């Protein structure tokens, strides 16, 4: 839940709850030519992507194991 001005709380809809947001932008963004590019940054981003995928697969596995 997010706080709005005036102390009112806005409930998130299911669609807003499951949006990819920054995670989706991390996987599906265009190359920015102004960003520095070296092997260390490429490796760091590759490892981050692998860890996000493994985490999501683990969460899916736990959900499937719990309900089936």
Image (cartoon, rainbow, N blue to C red):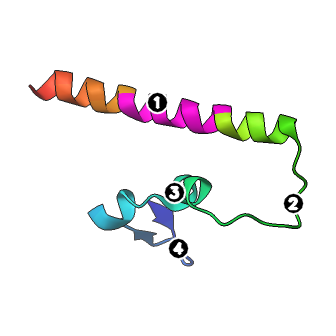
Q: Are marks 1 and 3 in contact (CB under 8 Å)?
A: no
55 falls in the magenta region: yes
Question: Rounded to the nearest whole Å, what is the CA distance between mark 1 and mark 2?
Answer: 27 Å
- SS label for mark 1: helix
Disc 1 or 2, which lies upstream in sequence?
A: 2
Picture mark count: 4
Which callout, 3 or 4, points at the residue further toward the start of the chain?
4
User: Which mark is in front, 3 or 4?
Assistant: 3
Image vertical order of residue 66 relative to residue 7, above or below:
above
Determine crowd level at label 1: few under 14, some 14-19, many 20+ residues with C-alpha closer than 10 A. few
Report the span colored magenta: 47-57
Q: Is residue 30 above or below residue 17?
A: below
Residue 28's place in the image compared with 58, above or below, is below
Residue at 62% across / 63% down in the picture?
Answer: 29
In the rendered structure, find residue 24 and report the number of the disc placed on it: 3
User: Do the residues under discs 2 and 4 have CB atoms within 8 angstroms?
Assistant: no
| Residue 63 location (% of width, % of height) | 24, 30
Dot 4: within a 10 Å radius of its alpha carbon, few (fewer than 14), some, or many (20 or more) residues?
Answer: few
Residue at label 4?
4
Residue situated furthest front in the rendering: 39
The label number, if any, that marks residue 55 in the structure image = 1
Screen quadrant of the N terminus: bottom left
**Front position among marks 2 and 4:** 2
**Residue receiving disc 2:** 35
């Amino acid at each position: 839940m997010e706080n709005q001005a005036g102390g009112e709380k806005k409930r998130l809809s299911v669609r807003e709850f499951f949006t990819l947001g920054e995670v989706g932008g991390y996987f599906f963004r265009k190359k920015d030519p102004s960003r520095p590019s070296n092997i260390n940054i490429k490796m760091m981003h590759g490892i981050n992507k692998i860890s996000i995928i493994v985490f999501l697969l683990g969460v899916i596995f736990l959900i499937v194991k719990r309900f089936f």
